[in-house]
Image (cartoon, coloured by chain):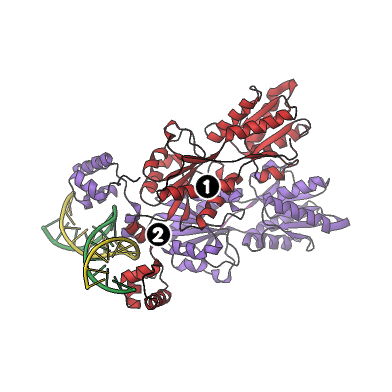
Chain colours: A red, B purple, C yellow, D green
Amino acid sequence: MTPQQPTLEMVAAEAGVSRSTVSRVVNGSPKVTPEAVAAVEAAIARLDYVPNRVARSLARSRTDVIALLVPEPSSTVFADPFFASIVRGVSTALSETDYTLSLLIASEQQAAKTRRFLLGGNVDGALVVSHHAGDDSYLHLGSTVPLVFGGRPVHPSAADAHYVDVDNVAAARLATAHLLSLGRRRIATIAGRQDMPAGLDRLAGWRAAGGDPALVEVGDFSLESGAAAMERLLERAGDEGIDGVFAANDQMAAGALGVLHAHGLRVPDDVALVGFDDDPYATTTTPQLTTVHQPSAALGEMLATTLVSLIDGDDVPRAQYAPTSLIRRASA
Amino acid sequence: MTPQQPTLEMVAAEAGVSRSTVSRVVNGSPKVTPEAVAAVEAAIARLDYVPNRVARSLARSRTDVIALLVPEPSSTVFADPFFASIVRGVSTALSETDYTLSLLIASEQQAAKTRRFLLGGNVDGALVVSHHAGDDSYLHLGSTVPLVFGGRPVHPSAADAHYVDVDNVAAARLATAHLLSLGRRRIATIAGRQDMPAGLDRLAGWRAAGGDPALVEVGDFSLESGAAAMERLLERAGDEGIDGVFAANDQMAAGALGVLHAHGLRVPDDVALVGFDDDPYATTTTPQLTTVHQPSAALGEMLATTLVSLIDGDDVPRAQYAPTSLIRRASA
DNA sequence: TTGAAAGCGCTAACAC
DNA sequence: GTGTTAGCGCTTTCAA
C-alpha cells in the first residue's frame, strides 16, 4: 500500500547535500544558498517528498495541531447551528496560522482515552466547548496543556481557567425586559440545560428581569425539547395564560412556535416570543424570531486566537466577553 | 507551563527496571513477571506518567488516529443533521477500537496543507465525506493512505476508490413513484447540489420515474435554498400548477413547505411533498414529512469499520450500499 | 523474563 | 552557509 514514503535523508542524498540543509530549505531558513535551495527543491519534487510531521513533532516537541474538544455527539451539538458557527470561526482564525484543527469527539465514558490523547503530546492545546457543569475532567489539565473554554466553566475548581463567553445573564435580562416593554406581564421561559452555564445564566437573567417564577420549563436546547416545554407551559399556565416567552435558544423557540400555532395562539399578538442565538432557525420561522444575537463566528475566532497566544506563552486575560444585542423581528 | 512530563525512562528508573520492561507493561505484554508489573504500575501511578503518543507513533509508524475529512464549514455540513448522524456512527464504531477520531476541517484553498497532514503520517487513514464532483484532491491519495469515501466519488479517476453509499437513484425513483401512485401528475423536484453525487443521483431517479422535465430547480441542501427553489417553481409552473414535489433532502422540503403554506397551498391536498434523509426536520414540520429514510448512523459505522479493515490490510469491497426505505407520514 | 542497543524521521546546537 | 552530532520518547529485535 505505502510505496515507501521518501525521507528527508533520501532527499539529501538525491540533492547531494546534508540533511540539515534539506531541513533548512523545508523550513524556509534564510541562510541557504540559492543553488542549494534549487537543488533541494528539485529533489523534493522529483521524489514527491512530504515531511513526516510526527517525527518533526517529536523533535520539536510541538505538533502545530490544536484540538477542539466536543462531548460525544449523541448530544445535539453537531446539529446546532451555533456550534457550526463556532467551528467556522475557529477554522477561519486558524487558517492564517500554521495550526491544524482537529475536532476531538470525547465521550465521557472514555475520559481516560481523551486525557491520554491530550497529555500524550498529540496537540499543542485544546479548546473545550459545550462543557458540562459537573465535568471537571479537563479543568485540571489546564496546568499541563493550554486550554481555553468556550463558555465559562461552572465547576468550582475552574477559578483560573481561561474562557471566552458572552454575558448570558445580561443578555437574557435584556430580552425579558423587551417583553416587559411590550406590556407583557405573564412571561414564561423555556430554559436550557441546567448543567451548562448558558442554560443557568439565561434563566438567571430572565428571573432577574421579572419573569414569572411559576412559569419555567427546562429543555435541552433542541427543537423537540422546546416544543415539549411549550406544551407543558401552556398546560401549566391554565386560565390566566401566558403572554410572553423567552426561550434560551432559537431552536427551542422554533419548537415552541409550532406548538403555539397548533394551539391557535397568535405570535406575537397573543404570545410574544424571544429567542437566543440569532441562528438560521430565527429567520426561517413564520413569524421570524426576535432574538438575542451573539457573534458566534467571532467567538470562535476569539477562542482560537486566545489559545494560540496561550501556547505562545503570552499573557492572556482569564475571561473575555463578546457583546450581544437584541435583534427585533416579528415575534416580539 | 509544562512541568516536565515524566518519560518512560523516568518510570524505569523509579521502578528499578529497564525501559523495555516499562514499555512491555504499558503495552500489556504477557511476558513480564507479576512483580515487575506491580513495580512499574506503582511507579507510573506515583509519577502520573502518560505515554507520549507522538514518540510511540514514530517508533511504530502508526498513529491510531483516523481523520474524518470535511470540507470547510462555510458550507452547510456542520448544521446538517444527516452529517451529525454520520459522525455519531463513526464515533460509535471507533469507540470500540483503539482509534481516536480526528475531524479535519479542510478548506479547498489549502488543499496542500491538508495533503501534507494526511501524508505526513499524522493519521492511519481517512474518511472523506461531502465530497465534490470536481475535487480530485484526495482521490489519488488513496494509494498512499487508506481512504474511504462517504458517498460515491463522481470524479472519473475514482474508479478504484472505496466508498459507502445508498442507492440514491433507486431511492429517488421510489419517492417519485409514490407521488405518482397518489395520482399526482405534475411532479416537480427541488434538486440538491449538482456537484455532489447525492444531488445528481436523486435528480436522475426523479427523472427516471417520470418527473416533469420542466419542473426542476436546484438548491444546495439548505433550508433557505429549498424555500427559494419552491418560489421559483411556483412562479414557473404558472396556471397548470404543481401537484407533487420531491425534494432532495428534508431541510429543503421544510423550506419548501413554508413557501407552500405562504401561498395558501395545502399539503398534501394541493401539493404532495416528499423529502429525503428522514432527519429531525421531517418530524418537526406540520404536516410531518413523508420521506426516504437512510440509515445515517449505520452508514457512519460502515465507513469506520471499512476504513479499519482497510488499514488492517483486509480485503474490502470497493462499494458498499446501505438500504433505504420510504417512510409515509402526512405530507404525501 | 529482562536488558542493551539500534533505530523511527526530523530538528537543533555547534563546529567548520 | 553547511555538515556533524546528538538527541526527541518510544518500540523492538537480539542476546543473555
Q: Position of residue A6 (x, y in %)?
A: 37, 71
Looking at the image, residue A34 lies above or below residue A61: below
Specify whether disc 1 shares its chain with disc 2: no
Look at 58% across and 35% down and name the residue there: A168
Look at 26% across and 47% down and name the residue there: B25
Work out whether residue A173 can be spotted: yes
Report, in whole angstroms, how far the alpha carbon at label 1 lies from the one at label 2: 40 Å
Q: Which residues are magenta?
A: B311-324
Task: Please name the amino acid that badge 1 sits on.
Answer: Met
Question: Could you tell me which chain the residue with mark 1 belongs to?
Answer: A
Task: Please name the amino acid that badge 2 sits on.
Answer: Asp
> For residue B322: magenta?
yes
- In this view, the mark in front (1 or 2): 1
- Main SS class of the magenta portion in the image: loop
Which residue is nearer to you in this view: A313 or A137? A313
Q: Is residue A307 left or right of residue B270?
A: left
Q: Is residue B76 left or right of residue B47?
A: right
Work out whether residue B320 can be spotted: no
Q: Is residue B176 left or right of residue A303?
A: right
Task: Say few, some or many: other residues with alpha carbon within 10 Å of mark 1 (under 14 / 14 to 19 / 20 or more).
Answer: many
Residue position marked by numbered label 1 in the rendering? A302
Q: Quadrant of residue B39?
A: top left
Which residue is nearer to you in this view: A108 or A276? A276
Looking at the image, residue A172 lies above or below residue A15: above
Element on which disc 2 rests: loop
Residue position marked by numbered label 2 in the rendering? B312
Looking at the image, residue B70 lies above or below residue A42: above
Q: Quadrant of residue A327?
A: top right
